Amino acid sequence: MDINTLIEVALITVKVILVSSILFALPIPLTWIERKVAGHIQLRLGPFRVGWHGILQPIADMIKLMFKEDIIPDKADKWLFKLAPIISLVPIFLTFATVPVGDKITVLGREITLYISDMNVGILYILAVAGIGVYGLIFGGWASNSKYALLGSMRSSAQMISYELALSFAAIGVVMVSNSLSLVDIVNSQKVSTWNICYQPLGFIIFIIAGLAEINRIPFDLSEDEGTLAAGYHVEYSSMRFSFFMLAEYVAMVLMSVLAVILFFGGWSGHAILPPIVWFLIKVSAFIYFFMWVRFTFPRYRYDQLMTIGWKILLPLSLVNILITGLFVI
Amino acid sequence: MANHEDIVTTKEITLSMGPQHPSAHGVLHLVLDMQGERILKASPDIGYLHRGTEKIAENLLYFQFVPYTDRLDYMCGMTNNLAYVQAVEKLLEIEMPERAKYIRVVAAEMSRIAGHLLSIGAWALDLGAMTVLLYAFREREMVLDLFEMLCGARMTFNYLRVGGVRRDVTPEFKEKCLEFVKLFPSRINDYEQLLTGNRIWLKRNKGVGVISAENAISLGLSGPNIRGSGVKWDIRKDEPYLVYDRIDFDIPTGENGDCFDRYMVRINEMRQSARIIEQALTQIPDGDCCADTPEIVPPKRKDIETNMESLIHHFKLISQGFKTPKGEVYSSIEAPKGELGVYIVSDGSEKPFRLKLRVPSFVNLQSVDTMCKNQYFADVIAIISSLDPVFGEVDK
């Protein structure tokens, strides 16, 4: 094996470790930001006690969660119960294998790509792998042997199936415009012309709505619906198993923001005054803020209304979008 | 081999909602029979907060029971005080000075605002719109601050007494209160902006928990819940007490009797309450805030400290109480949740022989099964919120 291959392997290993640790650490700033955003929207200050402006609050929460008793209900299916949080967490981490945060940079005369791998079926891979995550919710709800949890997982499975279709169809519009399934190529194609949002406004709206449903946030957070189901599928979970579900949810929110930016807002392309990666982060943060803003403004839909929107409105609209896009592309 | 039809048949499930549930509004235990997410039957199981309030009353002097009424509907204690002292006054046949009547109207209407704010805020929270609750609490905080100025307490007031009110209103209170009622309508617009036109809010509440006017009457609903069904029944207008007949205000009603109508009734009632407070504060005459009946109303604090006779009088009144004439009396008021009635049987002693509370939440709650039938599980939450039961009152 020559030295170049070794360096390649080392680089990929480093990148995998780096991405995973960033994703694991992500909820720390995100929970703080979410609570601050919530606080300011709701005329409060948010966390303020632990550290400067409560910045250490997530750390305190994490320590508390770790030391909580890990309760497994007596009548639960113990094996599935332990497996469920991992199933919901792993796929969402796997998707980041193909998520690019930039193009290439040159360090010490060597080109380094800012993604782990650029699959030629990138977007397909992400949607497929992210779809597995719902098994975590279903198993979690089923294994808990609790009616509330069961209802929550029942809702989430129906919801995921309905909205994944609309989400994928909205992405197809972008793929048709950009002529590629690879996320890097999609971004590069937007550098040549303008951002896809100009060609795909309808697709973008469908994508965001379906995305909100896909990541279980208000107004579509029916699987955990604390008003009705107390906490839905994770009602019986505690300690770190519970936090795994939370972690998966936050990473899913980041994934959805990243996808929206890459598919519709030109990824890391932007004016030359800032480096591309900064542009990328700015855009992603804007979307994350948007998701938080929505959460603290709207009530949530009812289960049957959610289904109606998914099947009767979003799905036909996304098909129309594909049709229109097809006509233009031809 | 198992029969295939046996495998695929769906089964009814029975779900216990509460007494520990985020949307149970206290300790409501609702046993729901469901087919999937459809409700077949909803049976409330109450009594988790039972404290035997009516029995306690039989062992207390008349004036000692006032603080217990604060703990009935603890979201708006002033109206409970009012209902009770008014019944005792009716029994005693004493007349209030005008000033006391106006102060009572102000206190009762502020209570109504505080109660409705919490009702709408908690309702929105249960349906996922968390922010509205904190907006509502901003104004509820102002009302509670005003109460604190008025009587020193924020939740359990014990402010009204048989024969008047405990403390006179100060000019500062009057000024602050007028400021509040001027500001308040614009704050109601804030909630309306977040909820009234919101598509999701409309979808969750329109056509949900419908109850017809006839049904509402036969189930004995009262307050905003019956007015949501289009029945114009408000004791303040129909059997005026205090000075409500001298004050100009409207009774908002709904048309369809669904959750949204009950929501709109509450929103509009808050606007009307602000109007009532403003009028009452401007019309309020000078004078004494307690009736001139020394055998019932204890002497003023200042006199007790300087005058031996007053001290003796005070001691005698507090330790022995006052006697009421023999008889029975029923008196009711329009509390924020509906008709709050007090029925007293007196045997001529210092303590009631029997006291019965007709609490609106208890009566309103019995319509929950009628409203929930064939609705979805998530609608139950909207329906309970729209009925706005408070369990201090339901369980007594």
Image: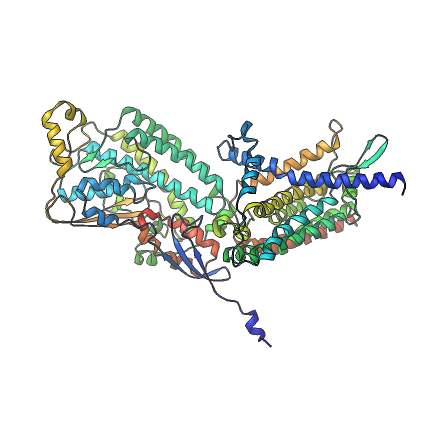
Q: Nearer the viewer, residue B332 or B70?
A: B70
Q: Quadrant of residue A268?
A: top right
- Position of residue A246 in the picture relative to residue B153 (left or right): right
Q: Residue at x 50, y 48 (%)?
A: A226
Q: Nearer the viewer, residue B194 or B65?
A: B65
Where is residue B60 drawn, in percent x and y?
Answer: 19, 44
Where is residue A107 drawn, in percent x and y?
Answer: 82, 31
Q: Nearer the viewer, residue B343 or A112?
A: A112
Where is residue B151 drawn, in percent x and y?
Answer: 28, 31
Say if residue A20 shows up in the picture.
Answer: yes
Where is residue A144 drawn, in percent x and y?
Answer: 54, 56
- In the depicted structure, whether residue A75 falls above or below residue A107: below
Q: Residue at x 68, y 46 (%)?
A: A93
Q: Nearer the viewer, residue A314 or B303?
A: B303
Picture colour scheme: rainbow
- Position of residue A132 in the picture relative to residue B102 (left or right): right
For this orientation, the residue located farthest to the top is B306
Q: Quadrant of residue B309?
A: top left
Q: Quadrant of the N terminus of chain A?
A: top right
Query: What is the total number of numbered labels drawn onto the structure image?
Result: 0
- Position of residue B88 in the picture relative to residue B12 (left or right): left
Say if residue B293 shows up in the picture.
Answer: no
For this orientation, the residue located farthest to the bottom is B1
- Position of residue B384 in the picture relative to residue B322 (left or right): right
